[in-house]
Amino acid sequence: MKGPITTLRERCRKCYSCVRNCPVKAIKVDKDHAEIIDSRCIGCGICVRVCSQQAKVIADSIPTVQSLMQGPDPVIAILGSSYPAFFNDIRPGQLVAGIKALGFSEVHEGASGVELIRRAYQTEIENQEKSATPLISSHCPAIVDLIEHHYPQLLRNLLKTEKKERQKLQDELDQRETELDEMEKTSELWKAEKKECMRLRDEIAGRKEVLAARLGNFLPVFCYPSGDYNATLRRAVEAAGFEAHGLGRRHR
């Protein structure tokens, strides 16, 4: 799996600046360039900053994003907390408007996710025993990658709140999808019942006209055959124009 940072080989001069400054030794020198070792890289970005030739760059994800935008699902942009440093010449509202103009359906700050799990963090910290090992926030991907790649013994110290909250949200989404499916089924049943009601209405109204013509009299009351009826039939009788309806006597 490719990491978040890549090397432009034609720019690299093998000056070793990236190699000397990488905190996790995730760069190796090949024949004509210094290459990122993706399995060790934590995406901290130090090599990007120290490279005088600008040979280390953030991996291009534009084709992936464009592919997502061409799909049926909405695409949401999440801004890192450092975005004001990169876009210091425009106002936040202008940045949001520009991102939406590119085709994103929504724009949010990544920091807003912290607010969603703040109380859960507080609860876990309050429930922690005094003798327990320190807890580490799992909000920063660089810290998580550092622990996963280089200090796996600290994985048990990572707060699991994000995972729990994601599962909670996923459960809520699954429940909502189930409710929507049930609503759709109910809607289909209602459509079928309405169609049957209209058919019965037309049939009853037609027979009413035939009887009225034969008897030379308007029939204001409908009697359910053998006393059997249901809500659909009752609505059809009312829609056919009868002023009253009642039960008939069963004949043995």
Image (tube, rainbow, N blue to C red):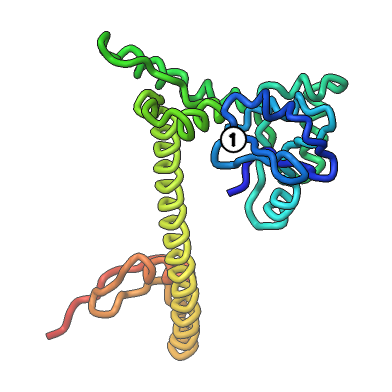
Against 251, residue 115 (above or below) is above
* Amino acid, disc 1: Cys
User: In the rendered image, which quarter is residue 190 located in?
Assistant: bottom left
x then y, percent, for residue 111: 60, 23
Residue placed at 35% from the left, 19% from the top?
A: 124
In this picture, is 26 found above or below 2?
A: above
At horizontal 65% and vertical 38% (from top left) the residue drawn is: 28
Q: Which residue is mark 1?
A: 41
Work out whether 222 lies above or below 136.
Answer: below
In which quadrant of the rendered view does residue 16 lie? top right
Image-based side of 149 in relation to 232, left or right: right
**Residue 135 in the image, given as x and y percentages of width and height:** 39, 18
Please identify the quadrant where the C terminus is shown. Answer: bottom left
**Residue 219, x across and y down, in percent:** 43, 76
Q: Residue furthest top?
A: 130
Q: Nearer the viewer, residue 174 or 134?
A: 134
* Residue depicted at x 65% and y 30%: 108
Q: Please state if 20 lies on the left or on the right of 204 as rendered.
A: right
Q: Is residue 129 visible?
A: yes
Residue 105 visible in the current orientation: no
Q: Nearer the viewer, residue 109 or 151?
A: 151
